[in-house]
Image: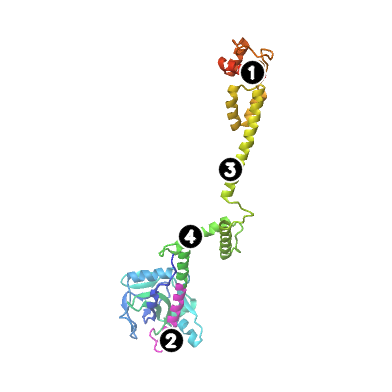
Amino acid sequence: MGDMKHKPNPRKMIKAAIAACSFELTAGSDLQILPAGEFRAVDGRPKDVKAWYVDAKVAASIIAELSARQNRIVIDYEHQTLLAADNGKPAPAAGWFKTLEWREGDGLYATDVEWTDTAKAHIEAKEYLYFSPVFSYSKKTGAVESVLLGAVTNNPALDGMSEVAIAAASQLLTNTESLTMDLEDLLERLRWMFNLPTLATADDILAEVNKAVDLIKADNATAAAGFNLITHLSTQHQSIVSLTAQVEAPDPAKFVSVTVMQDLQTQLAALNKQINDGEVEDLVTVALSDSRLLPAQEAWARELGAKDITALKSYLDTAQPIAALSATQTGGKIPDGDGITDLTESQLAVCKQMGVSPEDYKKTLQTSAQNKV
């Protein structure tokens, strides 16, 4: 994702206002906060837009904004919350509310007002008659954006108080806006961190955070309150850098290249073959000389030894020399002709047992007789 940039905040087009709304008070839980449609203060405000206004759509936005807050909205006496910094007097609460309801054609109501005992007594004694809301609104359209607080009062448009109170209300709005911007900035950074779309909600982000927490716990069984993500990521980064350096520039004293290893394996295989071939040669030569192998078996024996010298040794260890091939029938004299006529029954039995034809067997006897002369 690219660099994060702050987008223009539409709340910069929002202004705070104290409405001179003459809503009569009762000590019950229902309280009208704002009227339906367009309205103005008795002192002529607003000056920057035609009028303030609330409709069903605007009310739905106000209700949603308040529902997302943690704290209830305070109702004080004569807007003292806004004046306390200027006059140094305390600002006791008269009541609180959190839930708003839109009543078509009538206005926006608080339905869960909780009055203090003192405020109830003042209201029932008619010592305070009216409710005055403090809210933010769009400087372009006049639409109410958010209810900030309210006050019980006997003069909703008290002369001489408006400028100070509105300034304080504006500061309250600025503080609220700052918190909103800080939260949105945090959410934006988390969206970037988890590669989430720009419209991902706080719930979407929380789900990704929980996944990350689960992975960290699974990878670090001892992860607890002392776990530090920045330290963990830094350690992982250092490990990756170290491993990358080893791969790109390995230590010759500790690592051997694949090419060198393959060359060594080739040389070792050639040396093993040379040793094996020499041993097979010795075994076959001796076995031919003592008649444990027939000449017709030589090629087979050499092939077996090349594949499995242990199997060849095992065969030769159990093979018996053929007596007819270990001595001459002429007593060491050169026979007349080839010296070989018909084979005896015993020799024919040997041919059958060895799987050798009588003609090849006779040739073997001739060669053996000539070698022994």
Q: Is residue 275 visible?
A: yes
Give neighbour class at mark 1: few <14, some 14-19, many 20+ (Cα, 10 Å).
Answer: some
The local secondary structure at tag 3 comes to helix
Residue visible at 62% across and 37% down? 274
Say whether residue 36 is left or right of residue 297: left
The residue to which callout 3 is attached is: 266
Horizontal arrangement in the rendering, residue 192 relative to residue 314 (left or right): left
Q: Is residue 162 magenta?
A: yes
Question: Which of the two discs, 3 and 1, sits closer to the camera?
Answer: 1
> Label 1 near label 4: C-beta < 8 Å?
no
Comparing 216 with 270, the one in front is: 270
Residue range corresponding to the magenta coloring: 156-181
Which of disc 1 and disc 3 is earlier in sequence? Answer: 3
Dividing the picture into quadrants, the one containing residue 298 is top right
Query: Considering depth in this image, is 226 or 164 the residue closer to the camera?
Result: 226
- CA separation in Å, label 2 and label 3: 94 Å
- In the rendered view, tell whether residue 21 sits above or below residue 268: below
Image quarter in which the C terminus is found: top right
Task: Give the mark count.
Answer: 4
Query: Residue type at mark 4?
Result: Glu
Residue 233, percent from left and from top? 56, 63
* Secondary structure under the numbered disc 1 in the rendered image: helix
Name the residue tied to disc 4.
208
- Mark 2, mark 4: which one is toward the viewer? 4
